[in-house]
């Protein structure tokens, strides 16, 4: 690689670095130029954040954890006794989640907490106006307490406002719409008095009538209003169910985490803890239900047998007292022992028969199977019967858990319902067969008893009577003893029942935190948005803006050099360069004059300069007049020609008449000297456009036009042609061959970026030669700043106070 290649590569790298650096500088200049835009955006965004933080109702998040004992953990000790009183319950933890989120359990929790009334504190301003948007839930910290009258229905969903007036009186206000009827009331009442209406009935009491705040008129009790609202329990349950989240503490764990969001930290913690206790109590009640049902059944049986036992015992005692001592023969002893054995068998079969009747009626009449007494409790060891009862109980339990998370018509519920019906029919058939078999056994035993009774009848009367009394007593005593034993076992099982679940970490106020609003996060987000949105808006605005607003718009896309920047005129004068020769505007025209000298050569005389623009309104006539004036004050003789024969404007810049001008000269109705008008500026002459002709393009192409230009060059040093807009008509292109310099006027905020592409096209196609750009109406900040609205790093007006300008 030679030296030239190295130089070119380095030059390319430097150009890329400079371009990137310039783009960055332009971007930051643009931001600094619009500093007020960003400050306004920041103030607005932070104001919104403050309003959100102030008026958003706070939301608090709390959590607790519960241990769910796995179905694999088998009970030990006293709990082992319960297993015979109930069927197996291998709980699916996901079913327990469904129970925790169930409507019934949530309603049970809410009813136990008495959350049917919501209390809020409502701030007042100027001691009269309530700010309802700043109302906050205060739970049990309300100074007032509402007592409902019995179970009378209350108006729900409408807030009642209470203003404490003294320790004895308060002002009550409410307004509601009931069945399309508007109801409102504002009255003063005494604390404790009942307030009755067709829609509500309650009384308002002070929570603590001796509270110190009640005896100071400056306390918050008197500066704030308080509201209470009766809640619809169904809606309240649905709300808490939706807000409650239950999930695994970690994957495959038997620990559940309960999360809740609410309007007050005390509400969140109280609900979570009570809900966990309700869940545990429900599980324990389910276990105790079967043991309680067993005890009730045994008590009924004991109540029925106790009278018979008392009567048999009384008869036996009377017989013993009457006959003192009785000797029973060997034959009598044998008959009595055999009879006792048969009576015991019969009592056991009768006891089981009563259970079979109970079970048959229960299956036929009950839709649920949650408190059935299992056969093993009554000493029945029929394996087939026990299995069917356990299977039916498990199926009912599974369906109940599914119904907490699924609909009745879901495939899972329909499948388990079908299975329940199948097991139920099998169990009914099994019990019916057992009942029939039991009746046969009882009949067979009765026959055997009758055979023994025949033997007893052959015994002496006293001995025979003794055996019969002994038989009745023994029969009732055996049944009674057995029932007492079973009741004792059921009582022990009931007393030793413990819950399968327990609370690990209760919800604590210290661990409850506020999730909304988040003041610091909102302020940070607002600050970022307050800066980001104006920045994006600025970038999009610049991208979508088709007008030239920046020096960089021209420098980046133009292939034609910029010869001057004409600053914005603060005066209404037509020739401000003459009226205010020491102004920044006059200095910008002097800079343009200098650049023109470099473009056409200082010794070039006469020089023809054409000024044109892309559209009308870009200031070419203004620039033509003032450029002529700034050239004239150097001692040059300058002629400004109004060549826009379609929409004349040159005469207005010099306040002269347009009745005679270039159009008259070209059609031969006026001579050169008569068309020239001397301006108020020495050395500056004007030829206005004259009356609008029907054929302006043909006139500009005529021989008279060539003759006019030749005559003008003989008499003047500079000839400035104020031509029509180039993008609208082609008149300017007809005379460019006769010009030494062509100036395109671009006006800040008016000219479009497409005009630069149009000028580049004309220059590259050689249709216009020796062209330059003049940017008109540039607005620069008055203070010394490296940034201005136009985007320059320099500008004459920034030195306005330097003493060089007026």
Image (spheres, grey):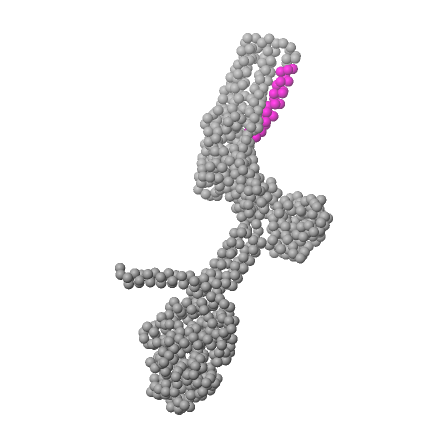
| Rendered residue at 35%/63% (across/down) | 15
Tell me if 693 is positioned left or right of 530 in this view: left
| Picture mark count | 0
Question: Looking at the picture, how far across and down is residue 670, in whole percent?
Answer: 40, 91
| Rendered residue at 41%/77% (across/down) | 593
| Rendered residue at 37%/68% (across/down) | 557
Picture layout, residue 304 above or below residue 235:
above
| Residue 287 appears in view | yes
Q: Is residue 182 magenta?
A: no
Question: Looking at the picture, how far across and down is residue 506, in whole percent?
Answer: 55, 38
Question: Looking at the picture, how far across and down is residue 210, in whole percent?
Answer: 71, 44
| Rendered residue at 47%/77% (across/down) | 586
Front one among 765 and 718: 718
Query: In which quadrant of the rendered view does residue 208 lie?
Result: top right
Question: Looking at the picture, how far across and down is residue 638, in whole percent?
Answer: 41, 84
Q: Is residue 308 magenta?
A: yes
- Give, as a single range, the part of the protein colored magenta: 291-318
On the rendered image, what quadrant is the N terminus found in?
bottom left
Residue occupying the far left of the picture: 1
Picture layout, residue 29 above or below residue 303:
below
Picture layout, residue 516 above or below residue 17:
above
Picture layout, residue 613 above or below residue 266:
below
What secondary structure do most residues of the magenta stretch adopt? helix
């Amino acid at each position: 690689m030679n030296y030239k290649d190295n130089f070119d590569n380095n030059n390319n790298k430097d150009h890329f670095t400079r371009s990137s650096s310039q783009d960055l500088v332009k971007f930051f200049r643009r931001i600094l130029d619009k500093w007020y835009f960003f400050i306004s955006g920041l103030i607005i965004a932070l104001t919104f954040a403050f309003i959100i933080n102030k008026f958003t109702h706070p939301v608090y998040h709390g959590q607790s954890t519960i241990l769910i004992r796995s179905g694999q953990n088998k009970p030990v000790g006293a709990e082992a006794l319960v297993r015979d009183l109930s069927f197996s319950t291998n709980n699916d933890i996901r079913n327990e989640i469904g129970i925790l989120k169930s409507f019934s359990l949530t309603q049970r929790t809410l009813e136990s907490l008495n959350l049917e009334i919501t209390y809020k504190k409502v701030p007042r301003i100027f001691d009269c106006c309530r700010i309802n948007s700043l109302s906050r839930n205060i739970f049990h910290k309300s100074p007032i307490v509402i007592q409902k009258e019995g179970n009378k229905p209350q108006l729900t969903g409408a807030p009642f406002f209470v203003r404490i007036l003294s320790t004895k009186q308060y002002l009550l206000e409410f307004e509601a719409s009931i069945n399309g009827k508007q109801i409102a009331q504002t009255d003063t009442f005494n604390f404790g008095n009942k307030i009755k209406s067709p829609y509500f009935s309650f009384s308002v009491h002070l929570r603590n009538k001796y509270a110190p705040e009640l005896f100071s008129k400056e306390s918050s009790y008197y500066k704030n209003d308080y509201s209470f609202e009766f809640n619809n329990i169904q809606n309240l349950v649905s709300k808490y169910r939706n807000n409650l989240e239950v999930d695994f503490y970690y994957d495959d764990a038997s620990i559940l985490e309960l999360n809740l969001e609410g309007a007050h930290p005390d509400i969140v913690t109280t609900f979570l803890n009570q809900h966990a206790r309700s869940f545990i109590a429900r599980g324990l009640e389910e276990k105790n239900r079967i043991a309680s049902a067993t005890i009730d059944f045994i008590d009924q049986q004991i109540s029925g047998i106790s009278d018979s036992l008392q009567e048999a015992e009384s008869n036996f005692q009377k017989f013993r007292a009457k006959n003192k001592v009785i000797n029973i023969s060997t034959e009598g002893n044998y008959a009595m022992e055999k009879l006792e054995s048969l009576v015991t068998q019969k009592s056991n079969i009768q006891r089981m028969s009563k259970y079979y009747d109970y079970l048959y009626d229960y299956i036929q009449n009950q839709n649920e199977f949650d408190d059935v007494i299992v056969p093993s409790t009554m000493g029945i060891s029929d394996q087939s019967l026990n299995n069917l009862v356990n299977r039916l109980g498990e199926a009912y339990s599974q369906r109940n858990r599914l119904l907490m998370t699924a609909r009745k018509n879901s495939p899972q519920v329909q499948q388990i319902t079908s299975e329940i019906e199948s097991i139920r029919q099998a169990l009914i058939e099994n019990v019916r067969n057992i009942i029939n078999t039991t009746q046969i056994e009882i009949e067979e035993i009765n026959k055997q008893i009758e055979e023994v009774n025949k033997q007893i009848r052959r015994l002496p009367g006293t001995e025979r009577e003794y055996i019969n009394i002994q038989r009745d007593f023994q029969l009732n005593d055996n049944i009674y003893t057995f029932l007492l034993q079973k009741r004792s076992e059921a009582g022990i099982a009931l007393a030793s029942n413990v819950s399968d679940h327990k609370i690990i970490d209760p919800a604590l106020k210290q661990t409850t935190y506020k999730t909304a609003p988040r003041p610091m996060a909102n302020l940070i987000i607002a600050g970022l948005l307050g800066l980001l949105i104006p920045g994006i808006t600025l970038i999009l605005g610049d991208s979508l803006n088709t007008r030239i607003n920046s020096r960089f718009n021209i420098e980046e896309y133009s292939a034609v050099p910029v010869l001057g920047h004409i600053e914005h005129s603060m005066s209404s004068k037509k020739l401000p360069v003459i009226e205010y020769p020491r102004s920044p505007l006059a200095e910008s025209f002097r800079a343009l004059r200098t650049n023109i000298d470099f473009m056409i050569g200082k010794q070039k005389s006469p020089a023809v300069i054409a000024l044109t623009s892309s559209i009308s309104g870009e200031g070419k006539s203004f620039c033509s007049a003032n450029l002529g004036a700034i050239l004239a004050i150097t001692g040059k003789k300058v002629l400004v020609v109004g060549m826009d024969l379609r929409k004349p404007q040159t005469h207005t810049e010099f306040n002269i008449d347009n009745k005679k001008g270039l159009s008259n000269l070209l059609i031969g109705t006026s001579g050169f000297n008569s068309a020239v008008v001397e301006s108020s500026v020495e050395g500056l002459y004007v030829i206005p456009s004259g009356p609008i002709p029907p054929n302006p393009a043909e006139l500009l192409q005529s021989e008279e036009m060539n003759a006019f230009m030749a005559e003008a060059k003989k008499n003047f040093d500079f000839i400035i042609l104020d031509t029509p807009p180039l993008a609208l008509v082609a008149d300017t292109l007809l005379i460019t061959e006769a010009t030494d310099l062509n100036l395109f006027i671009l006006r800040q905020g008016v000219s479009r970026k497409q005009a630069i592409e149009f000028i580049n096209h004309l220059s590259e196609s050689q249709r216009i030669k020796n062209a330059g750009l003049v940017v008109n109406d540039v607005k620069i900040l008055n203070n010394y700043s490296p940034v201005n609205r136009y985007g320059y790093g320099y500008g004459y007006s920034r030195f306005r106070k330097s003493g060089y300008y007026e």
